[in-house]
Each structure stands twice: as structure tokens, then as C-alpha cells.
Amino acid sequence: MNFKGVSETVGYIFIFGIVMTTVAYAFIHVSAIVKDTSDKYKIEGLRESFKRIQNVFFLSAYGGAPMQSIQSEIQGGRFYLSPEPEIKIEVIDSSGSHSILNTNIGALNFEYGNYRISIENGAVYENYYGFERTVVDPRIFIYQIETQSTPGNYHKVLTIILYKVKGNLSVSGMGALDLIFISNLNSSMLKEEGGYVNLTIEKSSFTKKWCEYLGLLTTEIRCADDIVTTSFQFDKLVIAIFDVEVRYRILS
């Protein structure tokens, strides 16, 4: 038997196996890098797309033309509406007047793999592999406005804008769709005497982000897993509630 020939054959097979294993590993590694880079670019595109959707969302409410639309790619993901979060507002003014509003405001969502981006009360939030990020803050503000009668004296003006999103949107797959927003002012409130607002947000998918933002506006805040409770003192109060109907049309 030619042991030298057998030895060389085994050696070639061994070397060939090492080469193929190295090539396969490199291919898998490079493919993973390419996919990861591709997903990052797609997610950045989705983030910018949702900023444009939010602009049209606001234009529908404030722009003078209540019906606005924008085209968006589905890209293998899913657009849908959810009924949460729920918001409760309790107003107590200096005269002792007391009023309560308790309503679901809903959210417009898009999911792609492990990525989710949502519009909740005008805010844009995203979740990627469990990491949450605020893209745009919600529509709750506190302004310090100088009084005309006494220069150097300031009033704390609390502004709360609520967007109640409704519709039957649930679309997934490829292609594109036309998102249509139809807004109208449901009700408003103006309090020109001081008082307090107790604000509670429940069942949001982004409770931590709500907690972070509202914690910048008041120290009277309590945060749990799915509920945020806050209290605001105000000199003047403005509350506006918009109904936003979301319709859609699949584009061929």
C-alpha cells in the first residue's frame, strides 16, 4: 500500500476542510454584517418616515385643512392602531371647581421585526430590541409668561393637547399605502385662575419615556410599570382635545 499517497490525500482533504470552514464562517459573518447594516439603514428610514407622518398628523389638526394624507412604504412590516394609552385629567381650580376627563387616546404603530415605532399623543417613540427612545416629545408643555400688568412677574401656563386616534387600520406585507388623517377639535378648556391638574397615563407601551419627559416638568410624579401619575400647579390652563380619524388606501 502507498502510505505516502494516502497521507497526502488525507492532508489535502484536511486542508480543503479548513478552507471551506473558513470561507463558510467568513460568508456567514459578512452576511450578518450586511444584514445588520441593511436593517439599520431601513430603521433610520422608518424613523424619518414617521417624522414626516407626524408632521402631516399635526398639519391635519392645525393647518386649516382637516384632511391630510401621506404615502408610506409597508416594507414587510405592519401598520396598526391600538386603543391604549388611557389618560385621566383631573382639574381643581382656586374657586373649588372640579372636573375630570378619562379617555383612551390610542396610538398609531408600525412594527418591523424587533423594531416598533409609535405616535402617542403627538409624541414619536421607538423600541428596538427592548431599547426605548424618544424621537419627538408629547404635546404637554409649561410656559412662563410675563404678566402685562406687572413686569417681572410671571404666570405658569400649562398646556395639554390630547389627540384621540381612532380607525380600523391594520395592514401588513409589502407595497405602499396612503395614510389619511381627518381631524377636528372635540373640546377645549381655558382656566385663567390658578389651580392644580392631576394627570394619569396608563397602559402605554412607553411608560418609561412618559415618565422621563413629565419628570422634567414637575417633581410631583410617580412611575410604575404601566402607569404614570403626576400633579401640576398652574396659574393658567389650556386643554385642547382633537379627534383624529385614521383611514388608509392600499396603493397598487
Image (cartoon, rainbow, N blue to C red):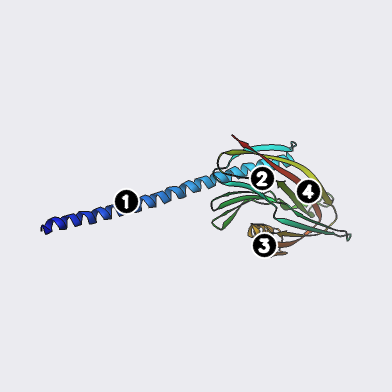
Residue 81 location (% of width, % of height):
67, 49
The residue that mark 3 highlights is 226
Determine the residue positioned at 77% across, 42% down: 184
Closest to the observer, 26 or 83: 83
Cα separation between marks 3 and 1: 48 Å
227 lies above or below 141: below
Cα separation between marks 2 and 4: 25 Å
250 lies above or below 4: above
Q: Residues within 10 Å of mark 2 (few under 14, many from 20)?
A: some
- Of circles 4 and 1, which is in front? 1
Question: Looking at the rendering, in which quadrant would you find the N terminus?
Answer: bottom left
- Of circles 3 and 1, which is in front? 1
> Residue 9: which quarter of the image?
bottom left
The residue that mark 1 highlights is 23
Give the residue type at disc 3: Asp
The residue that mark 2 highlights is 169
Q: Secondary structure at mark 4?
A: strand
Q: Which mark is residue 33?
A: none
Q: Residues within 10 Å of mark 4 (few under 14, many from 20)?
A: some
Do the residues under discs 3 and 4 have CB atoms within 8 angstroms? no
Give the residue type at disc 4: Ala
> Residue 63: which quarter of the image?
top right
Q: Secondary structure at mark 1?
A: helix
- Of circles 3 and 4, which is in front? 3
The residue that mark 4 highlights is 240
Give the residue type at disc 1: Val
